[in-house]
Amino acid sequence: MGEKAAGIKHFEKDGQPGLPLFEANERDKKEAYRKKVKSIKQAVVLTGAFTFLSIWGAFGNDIRAVFSDALTVDVEETGPWASGEIRPGRLSASEAEKLFLSVPSPASALKTSKDFSDVPHLGGSPADFEQAKSILKIFQDELGISHSSKIPLFDAGSVESQTSTLGIVNATAPRAWIDTYYPILNTPLERELQVIGEDGTVAWNADVEEVGDVADPAGKFAKTIGAWHGLSKAGDVTGKLVYVNYGSKEDFDELAAKGVDLTGKIAIARYGGLFRGLKVKGAQEAGAIGCLIYSDPRDDGSVTIANGYAPYPAGPARNPSSVQRGSVQFLSKYPGDPSTPGYPAYPNVTRQDSLNIPSIPSLPISWNNAQRLLAEIPDFTYALDGAMSSRAIRLKNDVDVKVTPIWNTMAVIPGHVKQEVVLLGCHRDAWVLGAADPISGTAAIVEIVKGLASWDAEEIGLVGSTEYGEDFHDFLRDHVVAYLNVDVATKGSRFQLGGSPSLGHLLRQAAIDIPHPTEANRTLWDARTDSGPLTGPKAMNLGGRSVEEIGADHYAEQVLMEEFAKPDSLNIRPLGSGSDYTVFLQRIGIASSDEGFGGTYTDPVYHYHSVYDSQRFQELYSDPGFVRHVAVAKHLGLVTLRLLQPPLLPLNTTQYALELGTYLKKVKSSASELSVDADFSGLEKAIISVQDASQELDRVKVKAVKRLEKAIKDLEKHRKGHCSHSRWARAANWVRKMFGVHRHHEHHHHHHAASAPRFGLAAADRTPASTETEFGKHKLPKRVRRVMKAAQAVIAINKKLSSFERGFINPEGIKDREWYRNLVVAPGKWTGYGATTFPALSEAIEIEKNATLVEHEIQRLRTQLVHLANNLQS
């Protein structure tokens, strides 16, 4: 029966079909229209939740039910969208985007931020568990999931947990649950930091905790969670103090070259430049017995007390008593539970010796304490000369190490394409209150879904997401087409967008289509060159400035901005590690992204992992008006909508293939500078073969889509005259079954059948012979066969697109850190956060300087890329 029959009226806009409204009788027009508008809003919310679902979950399949060129807004009779008078209908893609972009609001984001940053919630703590349950309830309420007296709380590895994720492809209604994993974590106990006099007595005893200032209400929590390093080693050591700058590999190499022996010493390093755990690793390998890490105002840009700015909370400069907590896991070795590398932390699992955590104790300390300790080094000048303190320093770090439950709150919303999953994530846990990290990300996501699914224990070492990725590796590999991550949505003025090059054009265009959060006539994309507002007389032009002048992180940012200024730059930051995309990108090979507003040289100083990462700081300095939170929410939602538009996945493999050539140029340059003799000709040919194969696939894509659209139009034209014929009804049922479309959508599909749907992977293995058998004794109509054949071609292309980055995954992994399997991009071995392209090959050149190993890695990478090119061509 046609959609315009049986009293269904259509609201149209710009000539495009609208959401049909079924009126039980004319007297109820106003009420029905009110419910229609409400259903649209709820459908937008549902769609977002679906996409963000995996914020600690796997938000479902292709939500083409809400995101497609002929968008369907589904109103489940048992869900919150049921009205008795509203029936499913269609929105065009542009209408869906317009509706979605009207949902996120600063007021709502502000409320979410306040709600989730009101108390400390360290991963694995009772407060963390309460938030996990709160998020579960939000999911249930927003998605119309019935509540029961028993919380759907499942141990990882249990039948219920396994079924919840593996059953995503068969789901017919939204679901939400909590998975519990059991990693080894630690929490702080007694810690001491002292200067020991020559007579062995304590000459100075530091207050190792942060000092709370009542001007910020967060200050009352300064000592609630001690200032310590997650996964740090317990120990009580005494030795002379040696300054090691950033504690980078280059710093330790320079000290060694100068004949400095760190054996038995305590290293003191400043934050910045590399992941803190690798600073401890470098000190440990250099022979140090302990490591202290502090925040130095020299890395705070122009906003410092020395430049006339008051310290927070009185002003925007660093509070000198603030401390940056954080994990000291050896992130570039492997993330997640230290005792279960490569496999999930189930209860009662067999555990291994932890190889990615330090063997020496460490502590994070404030600038106030650092100044006092550095004064113990005679004539201290920050020179990297190995000068030692005149008196000994005692460092004590006592921690409670135990198996600790953590909770990933999950949700899923099923869509038309049952075999394709889009995963969105944001972690929930924080070192203290975490108003920026991660609650700003949480607030942005809630603006999309009006709910939250969240990974746990990210701060300790990306634990929740890593355990989930290890648990469901094969499922994620086979079904997830993209993972979209948000961690810190806003902590400064500059929009920073990172991701796989295959997602680059999608990410960029979505940012171009969203207005700048604070300036008229500019876009969100333009915000990636913004700087902070505190451009006083001491703010300098960063061009040509050295690391020593502006600090390692600002220097790296300036180098990147200069690279982005080049006309051929994609302007998308490569992803290394440091957030929850790691397992999906680096181990499984799923196209991934991450985004948020970061700080600049002239921004108020963000107190990373401090008690002053607070609601007040967010409202006063980081994002007044909460407009950046909303901009990130809109961007993520828009990317998701477009990612799910039919008929082809918008993954640009050719852009990535071209980037491979850029990566090779960098490797060849490094080899030349270091006088490493290597033959790159075979690798260069392999890259060209991938580029050629991808460009040919682009041509095939255009033809395949045209063929499918023509076949569907032809089928629709002839089907209108046979809508009641049993043979056509059987054909419609077959098409639905083959392409994974749920039956309850049948009654409104045919009106817009000319819009090519995105077909799921379920049909990829079906053949004309098998479908002939399914169709029964009647001959399959030729027009249905044409649709089938055209659709199978599109399905095959989508499979190649979604599996492109799987082609970079080598089961042998990267030398000395085999957990990482992506041979094209990985976190740097001695950076942790930053990305290294062609990592195994680059490290063979730059770290090992071993010609034999270089040749081995060239051949390994060449073989990987040749195989990828062959897969694209098959």
Image: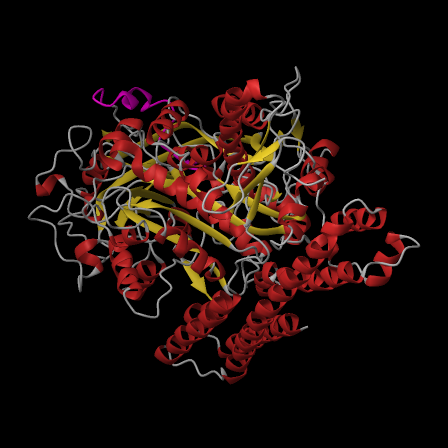
> Farthest right residue?
777
Query: Which residue is rendered at x = 60% and y = 54% of the image?
Result: 588
472, above or below 541, in the image: above
Residue 594 placed where, x, y %? 43, 49
Q: Is residue 424 visible?
A: yes
Query: Which residue is rendered at x = 36% and y = 59% of the image?
Result: 249
Q: Identify the image quadrant of the N terminus.
A: top right
**Left or right: residue 550 compared with residue 167:** left
Q: In the image, which residues are magenta?
A: 213-235
> Farthest left residue?
537
Q: Nearer the viewer, residue 787 or 742?
A: 787
Query: Which residue is rendered at x = 65% and y = 58% of the image?
Result: 713
Residue 743 placed where, x, y %? 74, 40
Q: Identify the image quadrant of the C terminus.
A: bottom right
**Left or right: residue 540 compared with residue 748:** left
Q: For residue 223: magenta?
A: yes
Q: Nearer the viewer, residue 793 or 167?
A: 793
Numbered label tally: 0
Dominant secondary-structure state across the stretch colored magenta: loop
158, above or below 286, in the image: above
Query: Which residue is rendered at x = 32% and y = 49% of the image?
Result: 524
Q: Is residue 809 visible?
A: no
Q: For residue 226: magenta?
A: yes
**Left or right: residue 391 compared with residue 451:** left
Q: Nearer the viewer, residue 734 or 273?
A: 734
**What colour scheme has been applied to the protein in the rendered image?**
secondary structure
Residue 872 placed where, x, y %? 62, 70
**Left or right: residue 161 compared with residue 223:** right
324, above or below 725, in the image: above
Residue 286 placed where, x, y %? 38, 56
> Farthest top residue?
149
Query: Which image quadrant for residue 413?
Result: top right
